[in-house]
Amino acid sequence: MLATHISRAFFKLCHGNQLVYNTCWEDPRLDRVALQLGEGDRLIVITSAGCNALDYALDGPERIDTVDVNPRQNALLDLKLAAIRRLDYDQFFELFGRGKVSDWSAVYTDALRAELPEASRKFWDKNGKFFLGQGRRPSFYFRGTAGMFASWINWYINRYAKVREDIDRLLAAETVEEQKEIYESRVKPAFWGPFIKWFMRRDAALSLLGVPRAQRKQLERYYPGGIAKFVEDSLDTVFSELPLKDNYFWRVYLTGEYTKECCPEYLKEENFARLKGTDGQPGLASRVHTHTTTILEHLKGADCDYSHFVLLDHMDWMAEHMHDMLALQWQEIVDRADDGAKLLWRSAAVICEFVDPIEVEVDGKKRRLGELLEYDRQLADELHEIDRVHTYGGFSIATLRRHGVSLDAARANTGKGQGGYAAGGRLNKKMIHTTEQAADGGVESAKDAVSPDALANTR
């Protein structure tokens, strides 16, 4: 009990007045296939670092409302939106691609500051040093609590494991086979030692990454070896089974910067132009709006209904500590969602059991969410299999059916491992057998779905 209180206190200390995420750690390429956004759609998403909201905007929905209780996360997205409006592409990429800018003071004062809401302006007035490229953390991507952890990992790589050259070779590898040889023969033996395994089991370390004790407990309930083994298996999968050439998540984590060939979609020149707009016409970024509040409170006062919801992993914490509020949040979601609305969420839990039993009221009758959510098992599993991040236990894709799902779907939702929950992609198949469709080659269809050409066809 004491350990739990200490862990919560440290987590609150880390996150109570800090920027946590400097980049999103959910793969938007998968989300865009699952969401199938288009003209007229209205999306609500938890802000995080704002990268994925900008990626979703490229599919042309009518409106994207980003919601976060941490005003610093919204300040980061506000800065990105201001930079899209006021900077040219080279300046924009220097700022958010390289994570540093030589003349920050001039860029901020002359172009960006006046574009920011007051709360965001105050934050960047104080924290513009994040972009100076100086000191022991010479990149914005080594700032914030998650960035602090990344900075420490890079110190460990350089000074203790001494595998920087091997990491660079790994990121430059042309094939998965080449990656695997470098990773298994050079990087893993030097990096994944007893100290790292011990460190990854510490709540303090996980707090810096934005992982509360509740999430750790959910994962460890079903994953043999616990959190340290899960992280080790995740890294094994990322570096020896999935292509790294376009894996910008791990590139920025291991180097502190993106390249123009390996970066989020919003940082690519052709997409920057679409977000910015031309000839006096507002770009797609003008459809993105930030809100510092909870999902529950935002939905209570929202002036529109929503066709899509991206809930990230925030329900993990609520399920343990704020279950009543989680039920209220789902009531608001059901009330403000279009019939047929798409919902995505992720979890540390390999098997998620807390959503379907929640009761909401529809047309004056109490209904379990398991009776209203139609899960896409096959697509969730196929997409999670090729997730470039690969650090979540599971991934859910659901469609809300206000008048109830089919009897077969409702029965499926009463089984262990709810509906469309992908149980951990490749790495968790060591423990859980996933759907026959994925085993029979469904992964290839998902690979086709997330190809650049396929994404272009959804626009």
Image (spheres, rainbow, N blue to C red):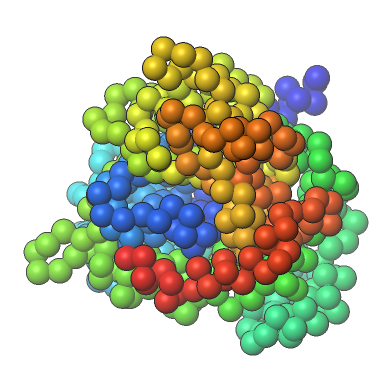
Question: Residue 79, percent across and down?
Answer: 33, 52
- The front one of 177 and 171 is 177
- Residue drawn at x 70%, y 76% as measured from the top left: 167
- Residue drawn at x 25%, y 70% as measured from the top left: 273
Relative to residue 171, is residue 200 depicted above or below?
Answer: above
Q: Is residue 169 left or right of residue 258?
A: right
- Residue drawn at x 87%, y 70% as measured from the top left: 189
- The front one of 132 and 410 is 410
The answer, for residue 429, to whether it is visible in the render is yes
Q: Is residue 344 left or right of residue 274?
A: right
Relative to residue 430, is residue 89 depicted above or below?
Answer: below
Question: Residue 225, percent across and down?
Answer: 88, 47
Relative to residue 165, is residue 4 depicted above or below?
Answer: above
Question: Residue 74, percent across and down?
Answer: 38, 43
- The front one of 368 and 312 is 368
Mark count: 0
Q: Residue furthest top?
A: 364
Q: Is residue 133 left or right of residue 412?
A: left
Residue 364: image quadrant is: top left
Residue 220: image quadrant is: top right
The answer, for residue 86, to whether it is visible in the render is no
Q: Quadrant of the C terminus?
A: bottom left
Q: Quadrant of the N terminus?
A: top right
Residue 267: image quadrant is: bottom left
Q: Is residue 232 left or right of residue 263?
A: right
Q: Residue furthest front?
A: 407
Question: Residue 412, percent across and down?
Answer: 66, 37
- Residue drawn at x 34%, y 22% as measured from the top left: 300
Q: Residue furthest right?
A: 194
